[in-house]
Image (cartoon, rainbow, N blue to C red):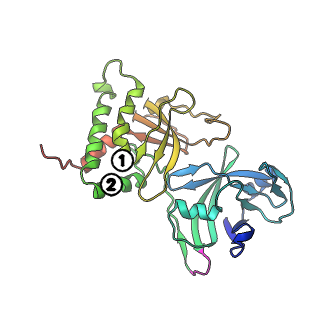
């Protein structure tokens, strides 16, 4: 499946547009039945909510972003209320050089009636070469059994820029985790105590928002490497076993996308789009970043 760009030279009449080509039967059937489907762009961090819509060949969007009969003649991505084209959004999220895309190869998953669109390859207009985009599985996950390359690269990059900061942050996390582990657990310690890790986590690129009592626990921002800031709900759990996937999500217009921050990860069947950050695993990773502080 791929998106083909049109109207590259007509920015005054709406700018670049992107038509779908080679959609699978399942995707095409779903789109034709719905008329329009909201698109979640998958970024280097994972899926993110957007204002883009996939619109079928015989539909268009009215002024309230609802599908009505139309005659465009192409299945396409429509900008909706977004501030830029889907191609420009891909360029920004993946930190690609300026320029117009001729083609974007994509993968599409249907989840909660939303198209999760993952860009796989891009080709600039007038350029002969195609460039592959890296696709990272569970990009924000860090557990004893799996550490995302994005996390590893972030820690290495931080350590190179600020020698000693990663060691300090991970040592602080170790101190917090100790109070939650079974063998050294502090009597009567509460789950929200894990928020003590907010300071060291911020130094690692993860800024926890306010802890709320309804819906998600913390709306959190990630700033890794040179990528834009990514916002996602975070659930605080001492043990990830306590996490229950919410079929109703966090609100009618929200994605089923979240990160679980836990001291211990023992959840056996975490949904694919739920990342897990296990503080105990980050603590164990401290051995790779020896402290440079003199005693």
Q: Residue furthest left?
A: 295
Does the rendering let one see residue 35? yes
Give the x, y percent position of residue 147: 40, 49
Q: Secondary structure at mark 2?
A: helix
Q: Main secondary structure of the magenta part?
A: loop
Asked whether the residues under the numbered discs 2 and 1 touch, taking CB atoms below 8 Å apart as contact, a structural biologist would say yes
Give the x, y percent position of residue 126: 61, 81
Q: Quadrant of residue 194?
A: top left
Please indicate whether residue 130 sits to the left or right of residue 25 in the image: left
Q: Secondary structure at mark 1?
A: loop
User: Which label belongs to residue 12?
Assistant: none
Q: Which residue is mark 2?
A: 158
Please indicate whether residue 177 sits to the left or right of residue 139 in the image: left
Distance between mark 2 and mark 1 Cα atoms: 7 Å
Give the x, y percent position of residue 125: 62, 77
In this view, 66 is above or below 247: below
Does the rendering let one see residue 144? no
Q: Quadrant of residue 257?
A: top right
Q: Residue at x 17, y 47 (%)?
A: 293
| First in sequence: mark 2 vs mark 1 | 2
Q: Residue at x 47, y 45 (%)?
A: 221
Give the x, y percent position of residue 123: 59, 73
Q: Residue at x 68, y 55 (%)?
A: 52
Other-residue count near label 2 (Cα within 10 Å), few / some / many at <14 / 14–19 / ≥20: some
User: Magenta segment range?
Assistant: 124-128
Other-residue count near label 1 (Cα within 10 Å), few / some / many at <14 / 14–19 / ≥20: many
In this view, 251 is above or below 141: above
Q: Which residue is mark 1?
A: 204
């Amino acid at each position: 499946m791929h998106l083909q760009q049109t109207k590259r030279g007509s920015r005054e009449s709406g700018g670049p547009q992107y038509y779908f080509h080679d959609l699978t039967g399942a995707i095409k059937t779903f789109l034709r039945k719905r008329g329009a489907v909201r698109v979640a762009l998958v970024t280097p961090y994972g899926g993110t909510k957007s204002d883009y819509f996939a619109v079928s060949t015989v539909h268009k969007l009215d002024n309230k972003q609802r599908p009505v009969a139309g005659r465009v003649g192409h299945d396409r991505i429509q900008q909706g209320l977004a501030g830029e084209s889907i191609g420009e959004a891909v360029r920004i999220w993946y930190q690609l050089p300026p320029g117009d895309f001729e083609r974007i190869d994509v993968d599409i998953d249907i989840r909660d009636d939303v198209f999760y669109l993952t860009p796989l390859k891009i080709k600039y207009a007038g350029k002969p070469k195609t460039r592959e985009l890296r696709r990272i599985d569970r990009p924000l996950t860090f557990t004893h059994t799996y550490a995302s390359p994005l996390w590893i690269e972030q820690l290495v990059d931080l350590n190179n820029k600020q020698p000693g900061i990663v060691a300090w942050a991970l040592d602080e996390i170790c101190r917090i985790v100790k109070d939650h582990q079974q063998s050294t657990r502090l009597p009567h310690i509460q789950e929200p105590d894990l928020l003590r890790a907010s300071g060291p986590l911020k130094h690692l690129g993860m800024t926890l928002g306010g802890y709320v009592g309804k819906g998600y626990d913390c709306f959190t921002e990630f700033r890794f490497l040179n990528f834009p800031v990514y916002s996602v709900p975070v659930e605080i759990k001492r043990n990830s076993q306590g996490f229950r996937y919410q079929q109703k999500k966090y609100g009618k217009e929200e994605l089923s996308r979240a990160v679980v921050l836990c001291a211990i990860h023992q959840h056996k069947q975490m949904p694919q789009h739920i990342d897990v950050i296990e503080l105990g695993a980050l603590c164990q990773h401290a051995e790779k970043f020896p402290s440079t502080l003199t005693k």
